[in-house]
Image (cartoon, rainbow, N blue to C red):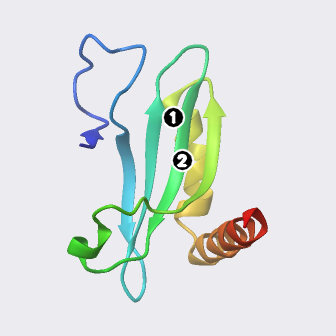
Amino acid sequence: MDRNANDAPGDDASRMSDPVLLYSRGLPGGGVVTIEAVSKETPAVRARVSVERRIDPQRRDGHAPPVIAEAQAPTQSTAFKELYRIASDNVAVARGLIQWQARRRDDR
């Protein structure tokens, strides 16, 4: 379950079991791009950009969306700023998906 960045931290302030959704927007033609913080561990926060290409939410079950970019930064704000440049730009998202597909092909 995703948590919102505005949720109050609980006992797990140093680590997150669930990603914190920092940003989300729809893509032309369907799908969603998101930025999530995946850890609060000091001294750095880890965050990622994911692209859910499946329009139908029922088809998303059991499939993790491609992660096209990751960042490690001293604060959540710094990680967000670094990844926002990618997540807010349709061309950068498309480029990230192409690179992700190429890595998958190379791993086979």
Q: Residue at x 63, y 41 (%)?
A: 71
Q: How many marks?
A: 2
Question: Tags 1 and 2 in contact by the CB under 8 Å rule?
Answer: no
Horizontal arrangement in the rendering, residue 61 relative to residue 99 (left or right): left
Q: Residue at x 42, y 78 (%)?
A: 27
Q: Position of residue 1 (x, y in %)?
A: 24, 43
Q: Secondary structure at mark 2?
A: strand
Q: Residue at x 45, y 38 (%)?
A: 37
**Amino acid at pointer 2:** Arg
Q: Position of residue 32 (x, y in %)?
A: 38, 69
- 24 or 19, which lies in front? 19
**Amino acid at pointer 1:** Ser
Q: Residue at x 31, y 80 (%)?
A: 55
Residue on which the image places disc 1: 77
- Which numbered disc covers residue 65? none
- 5 or 100, which lies in front? 100
Residue on which the image places disc 2: 48
Q: CA distance from mark 1 to mark 2?
A: 13 Å
